[in-house]
Amino acid sequence: MMHAAVLSMLIPRVSKASDAPIKVPVPEPVPENYMPKAPGCHLIQHSGPVHCARGRMRCRSCQVYSESKRHVLYAVDEDYDGISARPVLDFLDDDNKKFSSPYKTIGAFKDESQAKSFAQKYKIRIE
């Protein structure tokens, strides 16, 4: 058995996260001329910006980001390489079957009424 002194030399010390304020990025608005390809490949969600794939439970920045909520339009990321760690969302296909996929952020809506009218117009699900 190794003694605590030896173990403390072998295990690198991790510095605590900085208490400096975290600046939350403001998402770009949804482009006015944006036309969704397929309703199932899009989702409107009332959420905060995403910082990383670790999520709110493991990342302080993700916790702070999640407190700044807006209605955001997401689309399936068709250019995903399948290798890198990416956060995923649940989308519905044409047969109403759920599938999880990495996504890209199209933009944010000014308010809930704008998000609802866009969703009704293009038959996009709101969460």
Image (cartoon, grey):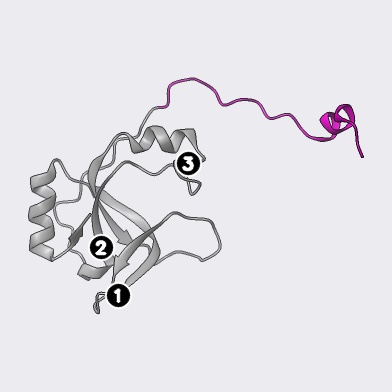
Residue furthest toward the front?
Answer: 1
Q: What distance separates the C-alpha of mark 1 from that of mark 3?
A: 28 Å
Residue furthest toward the right?
Answer: 1
> Residue at label 2?
42
> Residue at label 3?
57
Amino acid at circle 1: Lys
Q: Residue sitting at 56 percent across and 26 percent down?
A: 17
Q: Residue sitting at 14 percent across and 52 percent down?
A: 32
Q: Would you say residue 37 sits in the magenta stretch?
A: no
Front residue of 80 and 95: 95
Q: Main secondary structure of the magenta part?
A: loop
Q: Which mark is residue 119?
A: none
Amino acid at circle 2: His
- Tell me: residue 114, above or below residue 37: above
Q: Secondary structure at mark 3?
A: loop
Residue furthest toward the top?
Answer: 20
Instruction: Locate the N terminus and report the quarter of the image it occupies.
Output: top right
First in sequence: mark 1 vs mark 3: 3
Q: Secondary structure at mark 2?
A: strand
Q: What distance separates the C-alpha of mark 1 from that of mark 2?
A: 14 Å
Q: Position of residue 101 (x, y in %)?
A: 40, 64
Q: Position of residue 48 (x, y in %)?
A: 31, 41
> Residue at label 1?
97
Is residue 15 found left or right of 74 in the rendered image? right
Instruction: Locate the C terminus and report the quarter of the image it occupies.
Output: bottom left
Q: Position of residue 43 (x, y in %)?
A: 25, 59
- Tell me: residue 14, above or below residue 35: above
Q: Would you say residue 15 sits in the magenta stretch?
A: yes
The range drawn in magenta is 1-22
